Structure formats: C-alpha cells, structure tokens
Amino acid sequence: MIAVACDHGAFALKLAVLKYLDGRGLSYTDFGTDSEESCDYPVFVGKAARAVGAGACTRGIVLCSTGIGASIAANKVAGIRCALCGDPYSAEMTRRHNDSNMLAMGAGIVGESLALRIVAAWLDTPFEGGRHSRRIALIHALEQEELARHGQ
C-alpha cells in the first residue's frame, strides 16, 4: 500500500500519479488534499508519513510545488526516509543506497512525464543492502538518540 498526499500546488500532479498507480495495479491510500484550494501541506503530508512510519503503508509519495516542504515535513516523522527527487537517477539511487520509504517531488519543478519516470524508477528499484544496511542502521540510531534527547 502506497500513501499519497499533496498540497494545492501539486493537486494535478497527484491525480496523474494516482492514475499511474492505478494503471500498474498498485494499491494506495490518498491522504489529500482533494482540490486546488489553498491548504497547508504539513497536514496532508503528515498523515501520509505517519501511515508509512506506523507500517500501515509500505511507502509514500508526497508532492507540493517544490517538493522541499513536503520532504521536510515527512522527515519529521520517526522512521521516515523521504528523498526529494527531480530525476530518475536520484530516485533509483535513493532506493538502492538509502532504502527511502517516501518520495517527494515538486510539481513546479518536474512535469508530469518526468514525474512518472521518477515514480517508476523509485518503485522498481530494490534496496541493495550490504554496506548500505549499516548506514541505514546508523541513521536509525541517530534518530533514536534525538528522540531520546527530547524525551520521546
């Protein structure tokens, strides 16, 4: 199950991503927004990131005008490794080396065609493991240290 969320600036791109996922027969949960009416991306991105962090969804795709705010918001949720990608190579490498569980893109940065190629690369690329597993464990340890430091 893939969590999907966007703000008003990326609503049209979200619809294209959902159509693409439908075409591939992939299941998803749409966490909104549901229109081009101005909204606050952390509300919708937060819902998607929490679903991934809790294991209700295995991965997530979040969108806003630049992808920057969406990626920052998603990465505030424990267990999330959200990568902002503007090209298929970055999407491939963040899966291979970082085992990213969320993808962020900017609707004002990538067009629909490029966005769908990025999604395809991200979905189709497996995590390599090996030395990269050690690095993911170090990232997780850093996250846990910060949570403990803040009494969470």
Image: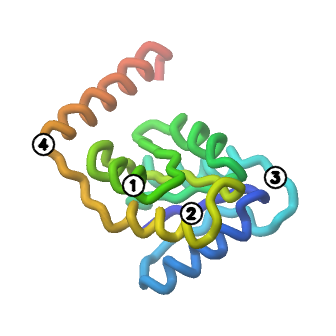
Residue 130, disc: 4
Residue 4, disc: 2
The answer to which of marks 1 and 2 sits earlier in the sequence is 2
Question: Can you give x and y, in whole percent of width and height, for residue 43 in the image?
Answer: 70, 48
**Which residue occupies the foreground of this view, 96 or 139?**
96
Q: CA distance from mark 1 to mark 2?
A: 21 Å
Q: Amino acid at mark 1?
A: Tyr
What is the quadrant of residue 15 in the picture?
bottom right
The answer to which of marks 1 and 4 sits earlier in the sequence is 1
- Residue positioned 77% across, 57% down in the render: 9
Q: Amino acid at mark 3?
A: Cys
Q: Amino acid at mark 2?
A: Val
Q: Are marks 3 and 2 in contact (CB under 8 Å)?
A: no
Q: Are marks 1 and 2 in contact (CB under 8 Å)?
A: no
User: Label 1: how many residues lie within 10 Å, few (<14), some (14-19) or many (20+)?
Assistant: few
Q: CA distance from mark 1 to mark 3?
A: 31 Å
Q: Which residue is mark 3?
A: 39
Residue 114 can be seen in this image? yes
Q: Which residue is mark 1?
A: 89
Q: Amino acid at mark 4?
A: Gly
Is 21 on the left-hand or right-hand side of 64? Answer: left
**Which residue occupies the foreground of this view, 94 or 40?**
94
* Residue furthest to the top: 149
